[in-house]
Image (tube, rainbow, N blue to C red):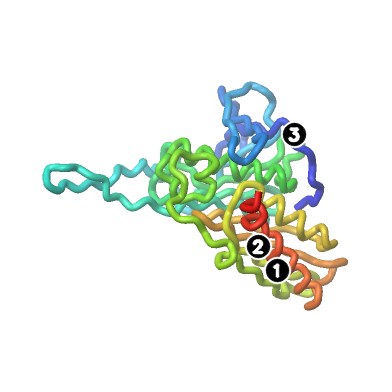
Amino acid sequence: MAMAMAAWSLGPQFSAVDSTNSFRPLERTISIAPPLKPSSGFVATTTTTKPSCIIHRRRLSSSGTTIIPRAAPVTDVEDGNQGITDTVPTPIVIIDQDSDPDSTVVEITFGDRLGALLDTHNKFSITKADTGRKVEDPELLEQIRLTIINNLIQYHPESSSQLALGAAFGLLPPKEQVDVDIATHINVSNDGPNRSLLYVETADRPGLLVDLVKIITDINIDVESGEFDTEGLLAKAKFHVSYQGKPIIRPLQQVLANSLRYFLTRPSTEESSF
């Protein structure tokens, strides 16, 4: 995972690629535009410009492709009134930099409701159009993550109340707010002879992936790869990290954990003081 904090670009344009990985031109591509501020959201627009990122639809584990239709809400009739009693599932967006050395693997789940959003594919690979390699810039990865969540909310507005980013992108903000002090968990463990594994769980918010990588690298720790999961109101990150090509020693582990905890629990206190 490249550590350079590149300035905002015009954003990637995505084109679909079939399961044979041969390029299939589309009439529409999706342009990801960065927001001026978190509350403004990411805007998906149609464009005919040359894509800078390409989506490769991955083969499913079964021999054929199963089309999962959008689930109709379960209804109940009581005293002559019809009400929706369907339980909204927890939306999950996984950005995986570990499983494929050549591409960024993205997986999206939202119960059985993703047929219309993903055209039956809920797991796919993303590569940069100019290099054919995985996306390594943290800012670009965060753009991809927020754009996926924004589109999920547009296709399934009911998911807004289950996502921390529903307050920024959706019509229905979460009914309950996560206590960041309680939700934040940080752990560093050995991960072989040359690196350590950093696990971070905390309340989700826009820009979190970029901020985590910046905090880690600001104390001269290298991030080699990792996985960033959005699970409803929470974000869960796993980073393979090292210091000068070696695992992080215990004193530095404590410095890293303290730095992350300070940053992750600080914003709610400081912002409320303005």
Instruction: Relative to 23, say whether 78 is above or below.
Output: below
Measured as percent of width and height from the top left, residue 166 is found at 50, 45
Question: Outermost residue, right direction?
Answer: 244
The residue under label 3 is: 9
Q: Mark 2: which secondary structure? A: strand
- For image coordinates 76% across by 35% down, the residue present is 130
Q: Which mark is residue 132?
A: none
Residue contact between numbered discs 2 and 1, judged by CB atoms under 8 Å: yes
For marks 2 and 1, the one nearer the N-term is: 1
**Which numbered marker is on residue 197?**
1
Front: mark 3 or 1: 3
Q: State how far apart marks 2 and 1 are (Cα).
A: 7 Å
Q: Amino acid at mark 1?
A: Leu
Residue 238, numbered label = 2
Q: Is residue 20 visible?
A: no
Residue projecting furthest to the bottom: 250
Could you classify mark 3 by the number of other residues whose Cα lies within 10 Å: few (under 14), some (14-19), or many (20 or more)? few
Which residue is rendered at x = 61% and y = 68% of the image? 185
